[in-house]
Image (spheres, rainbow, N blue to C red):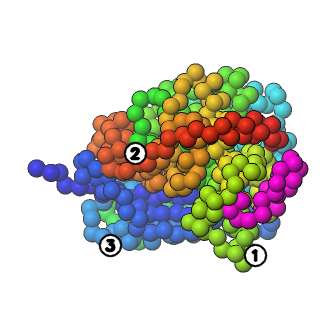
Amino acid sequence: MASLPSYHIACDLGAESGRVMLGTFDGQRLKLEEIHRFPNGPVRVHDSLRWNLLGIYREILQGLRMAAQRGHPIASIGVDSWAIDYAFIRGQEPLLRIPYHYRSARREAAFRAARNPDFERLVFGETGIQFMPINTLYALLADQAEDVMLLNTAERLLLVADWIHYLLCGRAVAEATNASTTQLFDPRTHKWSDKLISHFGFPRQLFPEIVPPGTVLGPLLPDVRAETGLSPIPVVAGCTHDTAAAVAAVPAQGDDWAYLSSGTWSLIGVELPAPLMNDAARAANFTNEVGYGGTIRFLKNIIGLWLLQECRRIWAREGHDHDYASLTPLAAAARPLRSLIQPNDPRFHSPTDMPAEIRAFCRETGQPEPQTPGEFARCIFDSLALLYAAKLEEMERLTGRKVRVLHIVGGGSKNELLNQLAADATGRTVVAGPVEATALGNVLSQLLALDSLPDLAAGRAVIRESFATIRYEPRPDDAWEAAHTRFAQLPG
């Protein structure tokens, strides 16, 4: 006799959009349905970039109302989000300040002021996290310089998904996968680094209890139930960091694989049983973030389709709206490997005019400047594929692990041209999909928390059974060898 299906809500918050998704599990297969989608993005306020978190919460409530109207017996709910950014709470005040966006310039200044060799040895030795100006540590250093009264007044600091959970169920905690991204978390002990908190003079009360992924936090609060029409279902802190959720849903087997979570950012890495925090990992600026079950996501956080998103934004402002579906065939028709950029060059992190920056980089390095949208897109895709290859080889040297398969998940996995170029550049089999890995990992975390699945391996088997993937084999082409050499010589 077949078991009755169970229903689970995944609220998946990205830097460009948010979704409320309904997962249905029949004991063997998992289905996912989008209930509500809404735009997200920074709001410029007095020359600073901020997040409209209350607006995001309002949209989540709308999605929960829509899910409740389906009439299904919802078993649980969980939220995942981008990392790093945070809200302050105190008593009955759920938001003491409009939270800053991770691209706000204030973090860059704090980052530059803080870094020196002793600082890097101390911080990496405690956290194993790569040095990026967007990290939570530098936002807090900026707060300390600009608004120390707020730091001393706040009762807790909550990362975005944890803050939404707090509004839903009233429990203020930090889930480990997201906490591990802050550069204030010790991945060996799975606790906050009291050594760093004391060293920088941050108020200790800001840092809440840390819970592992798959923790049942408690039922929805009465006001949330009244607002949405849902019953007192449990709120589950699964993998609240969106990349951790995506990695949990990678349909992989064995240990000869790496993952690439492809979207605005590209996060490329392997799953390790313990952190790798030696001098070589620090010099290569790799990172150790927590995954489901206490695993470590040893990875490199690199720029991704942000490059093309920003080009599209500038073109739209000029009256030319190029969507991804039209850009990909234009890129396929463009001359391959004509112009290359170093995607991780800081000039591409937050430019006012991305196409102008790409042209300038090519001009300065003696390469033809892209002129058409297809040439820009091809330049970006070729450069990203070469960057993936470089980081895979670096990761193999650091870990001693041979990677034979690269699993690409997330929105970028829909780009067939980029997937094939990744296979060609890396010389490895690429397996693309599922697209909705983040929301699926969110649901898997809930199923594991409720004992509906025995372990993560069983969850990944469910993903393989439920969702089709596409394989891309590398095509022999001597041009890639010369391109690797050219790419390695680029500045940035």
Residue occupying the point 33% across, 69% down = 68
Quadrant of the image for the C terminus? top right
Disc 2 residue type?
Answer: Ser
Out of 247 and 126, give the one closest to the viewer: 247
Front of the two marks 1 and 3: 1
Which quadrant of the structure image shows residue 14?
A: bottom right
- Looking at the rendering, the stretch of residues picked out in magenta corresponds to 355-375
Picture disc at residue 318? 1
Label 3 amino acid? Answer: Gln
- Per the image, the residue denoted by label 3 is 69
Does the magenta-highlighted stretch encompass residue 399?
A: no
Which of these two is toward me, 429 or 311? 429
**Is residue 57 placed above or below 471 in the rendered structure?**
below
Dot 1 falls on a residue whose secondary structure is loop
User: How many discs mark residues in the rendered view?
Assistant: 3
107 relative to 71 in the view: left or right: right
Q: Is residue 255 above or below residue 179?
A: above
Give x and y (percent) for residue 309.
Answer: 66, 62
Question: Residue pushed farthest bottom?
Answer: 319
In percent of the image, x 58 and y 21: which residue is there? 400
